[in-house]
Image (tube, helix red, strand yellow):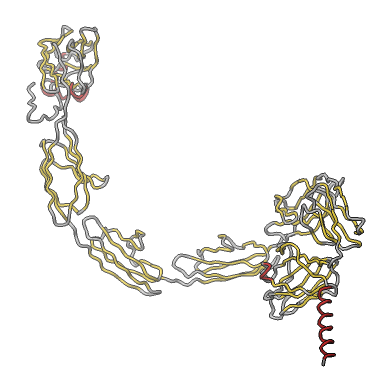
Amino acid sequence: MNTKLIIFFLSLFSITALAQELSTLKIVYKPELLTSEIISSDKRDANGKICAGLIILTDIHDLTFNSYNGIVDQKISPGKYFLFLSPDESMIEIYSNLYAPIKIIFSDLGIKLESGVVYQIKLTGYQKNNSIPINILTEPKDAQIIIDNISQEIGRTTFNITPGKHHIKIEKEGYKTVVDSINVSAENTLFQYKLEMIKPVLITIKSIPEGATIFMDDIEEGQTNRQLFKTPGNCKLKIIKYGYIPVEEFVEIKENESNEFIYELERDYGYLIINTIPEDADVFIDNKKFNKNPVELSSGEHIIEIRKVNYQTIFDTVSINMKETITKNYQLEKITGSLSLIIDPPDAQISIDNEVVSVLNPIEIKEGIHVIEVEKDGYEPYSEVIRIERNKSISREIKLETTIGSLQLTVYPIDAEVRLYKGNRLINNLTRSNYLELPVGEYRIEVSAVRYKTLMKNIVIKKNEKHEEEIRLEIEEFVDIKIQDIIAEGDILKNVSMDKSTGYIIINYDVDLEDGEKYKISLYLYDELNKKEIPLKLLSGDIGEGKIVGVNKYKKKIIWNYADEFRGGINNNNLYIKIIGEEISGGIPWYIYTLIGGAAAVYFLQDKIGEIINTPKHLPAYPPDRPFNP
């Protein structure tokens, strides 16, 4: 019994000692997702799914693997294991004769396997108690050091390495790569390398046709034809142009050579002919509209969309091979019903789903729920929700109810001009006292009169209510001016006088000329102190050039509106009115008056020669408190 216990403990001790003697496997750096690696579609797991990939870079040469779902396939090359795994796999176990096994849980490392996706990890082994610290110094210092195919942390110089021979590779973009074999021992621990800088060389990339996109090591570099500078070495070159077969290959960029790469691209297209009923349906291929047959498309799968308003949209896919012609026929199904409307009043506005429509009975509408709205000023709006069913008809008879109010308007002064607006539209010109029936809504009243301040007012007409409005305009203030007297110049002027009313000055005069003779009358405001004549503008009556003496040569009048011409007044007490009369040669011969005579002569002169002004054509209206006494 005691012997058996001794044997058991010795066995347990031996197993523990063996485990302690074994070195360990360890993953260095984070897993890397390789977007440039592609899994062939023929690599599939037991469930028919395209495999995921896991690349293991390592300096250990006797690795074996196991997983829950089993390893589908593997490719082994020096320092590299390429495992093909089920995309549903969650772990792998790695075994070696010299190291303790290691179990890798993918989720712990952030690895998410998917079909066609490839990850890369780096695995090394740590020996127990026999590694030697060594120093590897590089110039430049940020060069990438690779020991036994395992990339090390950039900037790191000290490494624990087992004694013996190891493979060293040092590289940096823009420098020549150094490859070396070192023998590590306790006496040989310092290794120094100085990289030689590589000068970029000019390369030329051309394509026929040009305009293809260039990718170098998966980085876009513009379009052909193009020249650019690159460091010598191997590079993955890819040329892509729509409608052509892509070109992808590894090229070597060499020093002291032309480095010209020319590619004649091969067309990659087929033809698609699409016939539709109705013929005017819109055809979209890959979200791009096409109007003519045939359509030239690159080989591969394309999405077709056929649509037309009020028809069921058709979606389809088509796969076209290079230089193949395919014909597709599509008949769209109508998805509409019809709506017939009888509207009273017939000129009311009709909207369906907020879009104004004309009444073209019947109206064709897409199946589904719709909102009809009918409105007109002065009427209650109408709204209804309707359901249109495919290939069915419905009808509606809609009579709007009137919404009328009234306006009672009184305006002072009685001769004021009144305008009524709805929005910016003039509704009516009104008089002093008005009664109107109006559609409900908001209106604007504008009232104006000479010598009064214009007034604008907004009113609201409500249904079945009378709106009473009384408007009294406010008299416009002005500053009076002082006129000393009137000065008359010219022998033709007789009996000149001046009368002044509020805001106006009236000049009376007679003309001492024979019938038919022409004359000119000018009127100025004369500054006696500064000897200055000031021309006047707001004049009416018998004034100006080309006046002709007619049947009435007496009691001529000129009216000057000084209140509007000088609203601020004039600070001058030396002002006079100056009237100048001048005879103009070339009057009407006496025999014309003898021949025509009387009223006929007046008519003739007005029609053929000019206007005869005996009295003012228009005198402004005066408020009751401003009598006008010429």
Residue 251 sits in which quadrant? bottom right
Residue at the image point whose x is 71% and y is 71% from the top: 52
Q: Is residue 605 visible?
A: no
Quadrant where the C terminus is found in the figure: top left
Q: Is residue 301 left or right of residue 538?
A: right
Q: Quadrant of residue 439?
A: bottom left
Q: Where does residue 243 sit, x and y in percent of width and height?
A: 68, 59
**Picture layout, residue 627 above or below residue 326:** above
Q: Work out whether residue 264 or residue 296 is closer to the camera in this orientation and state it.
A: 264
Is residue 281 found left or right of 345 in the rendered image? right
Answer left or right for 307 relative to 351. Answer: right
Looking at this view, is 31 or 223 the one in front?
A: 31
Q: Quadrant of residue 108?
A: bottom right
507 vs 10, nearest the viewer: 10
Across and down, in percent, residue 38 comes to 73, 66
Residue 209 visible (yes or no): yes
Above or below: residue 612 compared with residue 425: above
